[in-house]
Image (spheres, rainbow, N blue to C red):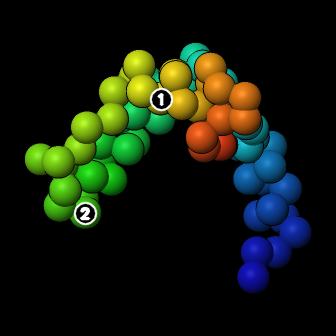
Amino acid sequence: MIDDALRTALADRYRVRRAVEHDVRALLTLMRQLAEFEGYDADFAVTEETLLAQGFARDPPHFHALA
């Protein structure tokens, strides 16, 4: 359990928000790193264009992300 002092310190340092189009490059980097860690990087086929089209150009989007 996180005590109140730590919770306050983390809240002052980090903000969680809905991802926006500007975050696509960072999201893709994190997704590639996860694919490498999980051992399926050879099959990883997501691109910036895919993320933009499926996450930000559709209503409703195919996915939601937090940054």
- Name the kind of residue labelled 1 in the image: Leu
Question: Residue at the spot x=60%, y=43% of the render?
Answer: 63
Residue 2 or residue 29, whichever sits in front:
29
Q: Residue 13's x, y, as percent?
A: 72, 42
Residue indicated by mark 1:
51
Q: Residue at x 62, y 20 (%)?
A: 57
Count of residue discs:
2
- Nearer the observer, 4 or 29: 29
Where is residue 66 shown, x and y percent of the image? 65, 43
Give the mark, 1 or 2, whose residue is nearer the N terminus: 2
Q: CA distance from mark 1 to mark 2?
A: 20 Å
Question: In the rendered view of the protein, which quadrant contains the N terminus?
Answer: bottom right
Q: Nearer the viewer, mark 1 or mark 2?
A: 1
Tell me which amino acid carries mark 2: Glu
Q: Is residue 65 visible?
A: no
Picture layout, residue 28 above or below residue 43? above
Q: Say which residue label 2 marks.
A: 38
State the residue in front, 40 or 12: 40
Considering the numbered disc 2 on the image, is that residue within a helix, a strand or a loop?
helix
Quarter assignment of residue 4: bottom right
Q: Is residue 35 visible?
A: yes
Q: Which percent across, then down, holds residue 9?
A: 78, 53
| Residue at (80, 43) in percent of width and height | 12
SS category of the residue bearing label 1: helix
Residue found 17% across the figure and 61% down from its top: 39
Displayed quadrant of residue 45: top left
